[in-house]
Amino acid sequence: MSKVVLITGASSGIGKSIASYLHTKNYKVYGTSRNPQNVSVPFSMVALDVTCPESIQKAVEEVVTKEGKLDVLINNAGKGITGPIEDTPTDEMRANFETNFFGAIEVMKAVLPTMRTQKSGLIINTTSIAGYMGLPFRGIYSASKGALELVTEALSMEVKQFGIRVVNAAPGDFATNIAAGRYHTPVFEESAYKEKYAENLALMDEHVDSGKDPIIMAKVIEQIIEAKNPKIHYKIGAFMEKFSIVLKRALPDKVYEKLLMNHYKL
């Protein structure tokens, strides 16, 4: 029987690419979106808002009722956020964590009872290479994805006894429309960070525009699904993006900070 895959945030970007690719590989794919009726894709869609536990529960129940099982959850729904920490509204910080961190946890909590009953299941959390380091003007995004990385590690140990595997896939920059969906703290005229933040906003968009093809991410996700004993951490991106994590572990803090500051022209 085909594996049943539920992937959140599948209406655009990396999520849509992953879902479309897995669909061509004969997985039974259910993507989610807050408004699935507005999405045209080759795979099935269900309504799900990761900030609403009732919506999550209803979507999971719909898939399990139709298919009788749920083999894979890909926790992909997420939002970007940029801005100097001092200038970014705290409410926007909380909203970002509600989607990127607490939303992902709520979806995991909703699928775990079914996976425990099956004595099998795989959860893949889409985090980010940015979650391995505090990036200037992206600190809240880095924090939300870094927090999900640590929860992935903890949950992996908690549920292994039930035959459930939990891993994370951390992408670097991919050519998607993620920049359009970010919350951008305005470049305030009176801000002490005005010039440097404006320069870095342009740099961030440039990185996304020149990013890799999302199909690379999709193929790695398939490899994770088919692996008999998957790793806990996967980094997917350009060599220098992945190497930056190695450098952080190897270099003194101040040296690594200087490298980042030079990169971001600070």
Image (cartoon, rainbow, N blue to C red):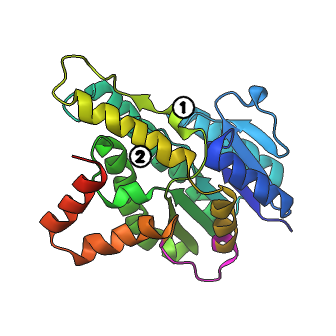
Q: Amino acid at mark 2?
A: Phe
| Residue 180: assigned label | 1
Camera-side residue: 197 or 11? Answer: 197
Q: How many other residues sit within 10 Å of disc 1, few (<14), some (14-19) or many (≥20)? A: few
Residue situated in front as seen by the camera: 21 or 156: 21
> Does residue 92 sit above or below 99 in this rendering?
above
Residue 228 is situated, as x and y percent measured from the top left of the image, at 65, 83
Foreground disc of the pair 1, 2: 1
Classify 134 as above or below 116. Answer: above
Horizontal arrangement in the rendering, residue 95 relative to residue 210 (left or right)? left
Q: Position of residue 143 (x, y in %)?
A: 31, 49
Question: What is the chief secondary structure element of the magenta stretch?
Answer: loop
**x, y (%) of residue 100?**
44, 44
For residue 101, which numbered disc appears in the image? Answer: 2
Residues packed near mark 2 inside 10 Å, few (<14), some (14 to 19) or many (20 plus): many
Q: Secondary structure at mark 2?
A: helix
Q: Is residue 229 magenta?
A: yes
Query: Which residue is at 41% across, 46% downward?
Result: 101
What residue is rendered at 40% in x and 68% in y?
153
Amino acid carrying label 1: it is: Ala
Q: Residue at the bottom extreme?
A: 228
Work out whether mark 1 precedes mark 2 in sequence or the reverse, and give the earlier one: 2
Q: CA distance from mark 1 to mark 2?
A: 20 Å
Name the side, left or right, on which 239 lies relative to 6. Answer: left
The numbered mark at residue 162 is: none
Q: Per the image, is 177 magenta?
A: no
Q: Which residues are magenta?
A: 224-233
Residue at the extreme top: 189
Specify whether residue 106 is in view.
no
The quarter of the image holding the N terminus is: bottom right
